[in-house]
Amino acid sequence: MAKNIEDLERLTSSQDLEALKNRVLPRIAIRKDPQAKPYNDVTHHIMICCDTGCASSGSMAIVDSFKKELAARNMEKSVDIVVIGCHGFCEMGPLLVVYPDDYYYIRLRPDDTSEIIEETIINRRPVPKLLYHDRETLRPIVRYNEIGFYAKQNRILLANCGHINPEDVEEYIAYDGYKALAKALTQKDQTDDLLMEVKKSGLRGRGGGGFPTGRKWELCRQAPGETKYIICNADEGDPGAFMDRSLMEGDPHRLLEGMIIGGLIIGAQEGYIYVRAEYPTAVKRLKNAIAQAEAIGFLGENILGSDFNFQIHIKEGAGAFVCGEETALMRSIEGQRGMPTTRPPFPAISGLWGAPTNNNNVETWANIPGIILNGGDWFASYGTEKSKGTKVFALTGKIRNTGLAEVSMGMTMREIIYDIGGGIQNNKKFKAVQIGGPSGGCLPESMIDRPVDYDSLVEAGAMMGSGGLVVVDEDTCMVALAQFFLTFTRDESCGKCTPCREGTTRMLNILNNITKGKGKAGDIELLEELARNVKLSALCGLGQTSPNPILSTLNYFREEYKAHIYEKRCPAHHCVDLITYWIDPDRCIGCGACRKKCPVQAIDGSPKKPHTIDVGRCIKCGACFGACRKNQAIFKK
């Protein structure tokens, strides 16, 4: 964190901002140039990821261990321990990078710190066992940008994450932070030109349907009314999604800068960040960033010596998924129950407290500084004709490299899953990918070479959503997957409108019956009818998109539904009620391993003679199947 932040002089111009940047640069020079001279006798920076993911794996204990080890060696003044945000490669956490040598260490434990200090800090050598090793060649890789996970990424939005201390505004400034704001304020009398840059960029909303951001801003800007608001929707509720959380934890000032610029262009003087309370680290760092921005003069009155005033408030939500819908979110900010309202009027005309309001998600706002600083054409040079820029995806599920990946729009699903994600765990066969969260759709293997952009995904029956990407393998039952997502949306329904409240419950009951072997003829047709009716008649976007997992799995995996209903069989051997375990007498050697593992004594047999399973007593727990992996005499059918 910046030392003596309260003593920093209030900035009055962009020239002062550049002076502050130049003052900070020597302090972080060794991160950019291995030949840089030590600053204040500091020879090394140890950058330790302490975002939510790495912290849950014990990174704070590693920080403490380093501090103790350095103090014991009287080295605490020559080595800076810098807490950073998400580096993206969550599968390998806790992570750290040691500068100036740029050594990248993975899966660390507190007892690794002594060796790192001895070898890397004192002797300037890497510790081979702590490096990432290439899966194919087993070659240790010293620097992170040589790892396949990063090689095909285009980290523009995530450029600072993992490289700066998110609790130090000076470090953000050293990486050109708030320079876009200073540029915008020099054109505050030509906000039409600034809006044109946003429109020229082709930026589309990164939180849902992909509405053009510039057009959305324009509608709010043109709406009558002296008081206007902007909102950052940080209520990230999709299962498996953590893009917004990582951005807020790793680079909070980028979000603030984008919102301040947005307020200037739209004509708003107040903004709200609606963030779920389950993100305590993000909330803490946002509050710290707001306090620092106010202390220096980026927030408050007469920002950077101009006559532009802007304030940002944080509203912590209780975690209701429906509050991700913008009208429900606004009701929650107002202190009401978070439930959607009918549209029109749209928020751009009548939103928060009846005033014109613009709502974008974290990723959308965070793209604004780059667009204003570098120009709309620069942003539009990435991506495809209709889907500009880059997109951050959260890779989860049965994929080897779970984590955050930022890629140019238009990259194929195959490149994302195999080149960046490292392929499927345990060398299983890729089956499908669920993209867009519970409101998205499942795409099969036949679409793995489809470009990932807004229009291509909608055409295939899915959607971009906020960027959650869940990979499933051959052992995944697609009926059960649809059941999982529908269970989530049913539980999270606010219950205000009948189609969503009753429709999701009715569809879920049918799916429950199918997975339990109680499906019957006509269930598929009834599911389709219910799904289409809910899609057409639900009040809000969340209700309207809740049937997407059902419709997409029925479209691409209809045979699995039929097998469950008509053959009482789960092709993926996942649905317990449709599984029968049996022992092949020609393979069984009577070792007794399965009998010992069975919790209900459902396996009979004498030593060295074929065993049998009593189907009546079997609870289908699968313990016998796991115990017999060596001889493979037990089968599921």
Image (spheres, helix red, strand yellow):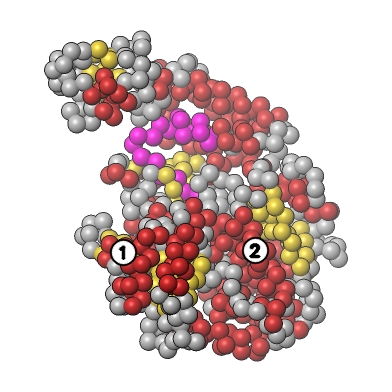
- Mark number displayed over residue 286: 2
Whether residue 472 appears in magenta in the rendering, the answer is yes
Determine crowd level at label 2: few under 14, some 14-19, many 20+ residues with C-alpha closer than 10 A: many
Residue ID for mark 1: 131
Q: Quadrant of residue 267?
A: bottom right
User: Which percent across, then down, holds residue 255?
Assistant: 62, 66
Residues at marks 2 and 1, CA–CA distance in whole angstroms: 32 Å
Q: Quadrant of the N terminus?
A: bottom right
Q: Is residue 342 magenta?
A: no
**In the rendering, at what x and y percent does residue 137 appear?**
21, 60
Task: Tell me if 225 is positioned left or right of 622 in this view.
Answer: right
* Mark 1 residue element: loop
**Is residue 365 at least partly visible in the picture?**
no
Q: Which amino acid, mark 1?
A: Leu
The residue at the point 55 percent across, 80 percent down is: 174
Instruction: Return the x and y of residue 607 as percentages of the image width and height.
Output: 16, 16
Q: Residue at x 33, y 45 (%)?
A: 425
Marks 2 and 1 close (CB-CB < 8 Å): no
Residues rendered magenta in the picture:
467-486
* Residue 606 appears anywhere in the view: yes
